[in-house]
């Protein structure tokens, strides 16, 4: 699949994220058993990112 990370600044102040600056962490955990119910949402087979409908 495709992993996307969207960042939104809700303050009135600018936030500068410099090249190679760390600002997020993602952790993957290996499941010890099968899932009870798999994800079947609108992004399941997505091949690209898509903007938020809330903005």
Image: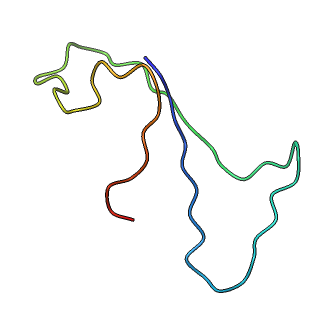
Question: Which residue shows up at 85% across the image and 49% down it?
Answer: 21
Question: Which residue shows up at 32% across the image and 55% down it?
Answer: 53
Residue farthest along the left direction in this orientation = 36
Vertical order, 54 against 23 (above or below): below
| The N terminus sits in image quarter | top left
Question: Which residue shows up at 72% across the image and 53% down it?
Answer: 23
Q: Is residue 19 left or right of 12 when viewed as pictured?
A: right
Vertical order, 40 against 23 (above or below): above
The image's colour scheme reads: rainbow
Position of residue 2 measured from the top left corner of the image (x, y, whole percent): 47, 22
Question: Who is closer to the viewer here, 50 or 20?
Answer: 50
Position of residue 43 measured from the top left corner of the image (x, y, whole percent): 29, 30
Question: Who is closer to the viewer here, 37 or 34?
Answer: 37
Position of residue 30 measured from the top left corner of the image (x, y, whole percent): 42, 19
Q: How many marks?
A: 0
Vertical order, 22 against 33 (above or below): below
Residue farthest along the right direction in this orientation = 19
Position of residue 28 measured from the top left corner of the image (x, y, whole percent): 49, 28
| The C terminus sits in image quarter | bottom left
Question: Which residue shows up at 20% across the image and 27% down it?
Answer: 39
Residue 18 found in image quarter: bottom right
Vertical order, 29 against 24 (above or below): above
């Amino acid at each position: 699949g495709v992993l996307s990370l969207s960042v939104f600044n809700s303050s009135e102040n600018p936030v500068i994220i410099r090249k190679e600056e760390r600002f997020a962490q993602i952790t993957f955990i290996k499941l010890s058993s099968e899932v009870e119910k798999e994800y079947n949402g609108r992004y399941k087979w997505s091949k690209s990112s898509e903007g938020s409908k809330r903005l």
